[in-house]
Amino acid sequence: MEKQELKDFITNEIRTFGRRHGKKLSNRKQWLMDNLLPKIAPKSDDFSEKPAILEIGFGNGEHLRDLALSNPDKIIVGAEPFTNGVAALMSSITNESDNILYDEYKNIRVHPDDVRLLLKDFESAQFDEIWVLHPDPWPKARHEKRRLLNHDFLNLLSKHIQNGGKIVIGTDHWEYYDWIVEQLKQTNLKILSTDLDIIKTRYQLKNKAGTFAPKYLILSNN
Ligand SMILES: C[S@@+](CC[C@H](N)C(=O)[O-])C[C@H]1O[C@@H](n2cnc3c(N)ncnc32)[C@H](O)[C@@H]1O
């Protein structure tokens, strides 16, 4: 399949609870999308020069920013197809008066699209950590095939973690959690731990569905 065909195919396959494009962006956010975003796109050098961490579906980027602050020597790559989330991140990592990127966030790279396209473009990229916090649960049985964390995708992620690296998954949808645990049986991933302090992402704090406390999976491939 040609790259554009693949892109169309994958893009058509993405289903999220949010829209890919939400409300119109402010002038500042639109400026950041047009001018800053291309400058902080992931490049192949990013993966050869420094260790990297990936966050998939970063929403508005609260946890991505925490990762950037607590890992100043690593490259923090975020993938998120929802434009308003990407714009919210851009806004929070730049100074409102001059739109300049704050120094402490200079290690952030953003792929504003499906993470599967990023992993296709950077087939040999290796990450110390891969985070997936509150993936869309697709609770209806007929939508189960839309769930991102199926065994094929988990096997793909497994290829992208360094020796000794880890994948961290968090969800408050316990049925999805159990489903992921079942999917793991068709992968080489092992559960290292399920013990993690609750991470307060925007989704977690809103907890619109009034669901349970999040459960976590920390996985390794060796
Ligand atoms: C329920 S939201 C959680 C957002 C954030 N992690 C949080 O906890 O606030 C799930 C996010 O995953 C993103 N997403 C869905 N499919 C994706 C994919 N294939 N690649 C990257 N992100 C994806 C959605 O756009 C959405 O922002």
Image: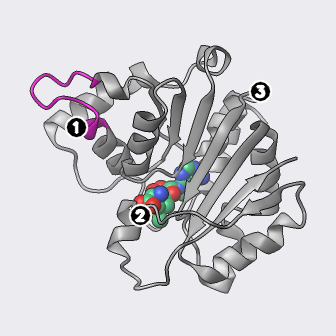
Along the polypeptide, which appears first: circle 1 or circle 2? 2
Three-letter amino acid code at the position of disc 2: Gly
Residue 108 seen from this side: yes
Q: Is residue 164 left or right of residue 23?
A: right
Decide: few, some or many residues near mark 1? Use Cα within 10 Å; few <14, some 14-19, many ≥20.
Answer: many
Q: Marks 3/2: CA distance?
A: 30 Å
The residue beneath circle 2 is 18
Q: Is mark 1 within 8 Å of ligand 1?
A: no
The residue beneath circle 1 is 29
Disc 1 is placed on an element classified as helix
Q: Contact, CB < 8 Å: mark 3 with mark 2?
A: no
Three-letter amino acid code at the position of disc 3: Ser
Is residue 135 within the magenta segment? no
Q: Quadrant of residue 35?
A: top left
In the rendered view, tell whether residue 85 sits above or below residue 147: above
The residue beneath circle 3 is 124
Residue 143 seen from this side: no
Q: Marks 3/1: CA distance?
A: 32 Å
Q: Marks 1/2: CA distance?
A: 19 Å
Q: Is residue 123 left or right of residue 100?
A: right
Q: Is residue 151 left or right of residue 85?
A: right
Q: Residue at x 15, y 36 (%)?
A: 27
The residue closer to the viewer here, 35 or 219, is 219
Q: Which mark is residue 218?
A: none
Decide: few, some or many residues near mark 3? Use Cα within 10 Å; few <14, some 14-19, many ≥20.
Answer: few
Q: Quadrant of residue 147?
A: bottom right
Magenta segment range?
A: 90-102
Disc 3 is placed on an element classified as loop
Residue 93 placement (x, y as % from top left): 29, 34
Residue 217 placement (x, y as % from top left): 68, 64
In the rendered view, tell whether residue 39 sits above or below residue 176: above
